[in-house]
Amino acid sequence: MQSRAFPILALPLLAAAAACGGADRSSSSESGPGSGQFSVTSDRPIAGSDTAASYSIAVSFTTEPSCTTQTVSACTVNPCYQSSRSGNANTPLPSAGQVTFAGVGTTSLALAPQSDGNYATETVAGQLPWETGGSAVTFEWARFPGNAGQPGDSIVLSTPPYVALVAGSAFAAETSTVVRDHDLTVSWTSDSAPSELDDVAVDVSSASVQVYCIFPAASGTGVVPAAVLGLLEPGDGTYDVHSKENAYERIDAGEGSWGMSFNVDAHARTSYGLAKGSVTIR
C-alpha cells in the first residue's frame, strides 16, 4: 500500500487514516470529534469533448463515530453507509466555513455552510474542471471545523485520467442487476497515462451497505470478489465506477483531531453514458 504526502499548509498533521467507506490506501486507529469530506467530480461522457460535460463539488461533515469496516482483498465493506447525521437549526453541524475549489482553466467556485451546517452540492454544466490527468486542483477551507477562532488551510491534489470501460467489462453495457454470488470484473482504458497514485474505484451499494473497491488505474482491470458482493443486501442498489486521486489527513488545533478526506474523481465513460446508476442486487 502507498500513501502520498500532500501540502497542508498551516494545521499540524497526525497519522493518515482510511475513512469509513473511503478510498485512502493507509490506515490508523486515530479518532476524533468528527470527520469531513471534500470532493470534486467531473463527468465527461464523450471523449475529448465538453459536450454534455459537467462537474460538481460537495462538502460534508459529521460528528457521528467512525464505522467499523471490513476489508476483503482490494475492497472495503461499510455497513453504515447511509447513517450520516444531518444538522438542524437548533443543533447545526460543525463546518469549516467557506470552502473553495479551484481547478485548471476554471474560475474559483465556493460553497458556504447553511444555517444547519450542511453544504449544498454545486453543479456546473457545460464545463470541465480539468482536461487531462496530472493537473493540479486546490481545496481551501476558511476555518478549523466547528471553531471560527482557528484558521483553515488548503490542499493541492493532482487530477486522475479520464477512463472508459471496455467491451466485456461489468457496467460497460447497460445492466439492471448485480448477482452477489458471481465475481464482478471491471476493465478500462485511460485517456492519458495514469500515475502510480491514480486509482479506479468501483462502488456498489444497497440499503446501508457499501462495497468500495480500489484498483491501480494503470492495471486496467480489477475484480470485486463474490465474497464481498455477498455482504450486500438484496434489493434496490446503486453502482458507480470512477477514476480518482485522494488524500486523507487528520488535522489538530489542540481541541481534538478531525479526519479530513479529499477526493478528485471522474466518472468512467461507457457505451450508454457514464458508469453510474441504479441496479437490483440479487
Image (spheres, rainbow, N blue to C red):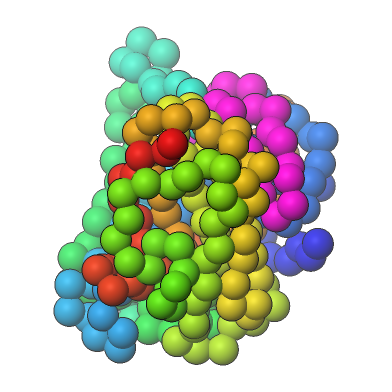
Vertical position of residue 117 compared to residue 230: above or below: above
Q: Where is residue 55 in the image (x, y as percent from the top left)?
A: 30, 64
Q: Residue at 70% x, 28% y: name it.
A: 68
Q: Where is residue 21 in the image (x, y as percent from the top left)?
A: 59, 41
Q: Where is residue 225 in the image (x, y as percent from the top left)?
A: 64, 51
Provide the residue span drawn in magenta.
60-80
Q: Residue at 49% x, 82% y: name it.
A: 189
Vertical position of residue 101 compared to residue 118: above or below: below
Instruction: Name the residue furthest top.
Output: 90
Is residue 61 located in the magenta-colored stretch of the structure? yes
Q: In this view, does 140 lie to the left or right of 275?
A: right
Q: Position of residue 145 (x, y in %)?
A: 55, 35
Q: In this view, does 250 lie to the left or right of 206?
A: right
Q: Residue at 22% x, 62% y: name it.
A: 124
Indicate the quadrant where residue 130 lies.
Answer: bottom left
Q: In which quarter of the image is the C terminus?
A: top left
Vertical position of residue 150 compared to residue 157: above or below: above
Q: Is residue 49 left or right of residue 18?
A: left
Choose between 126 and 8: the one closer to the eye.
Answer: 126
Q: Is residue 93 visible?
A: no
Choose between 191 and 117: the one closer to the eye.
Answer: 191
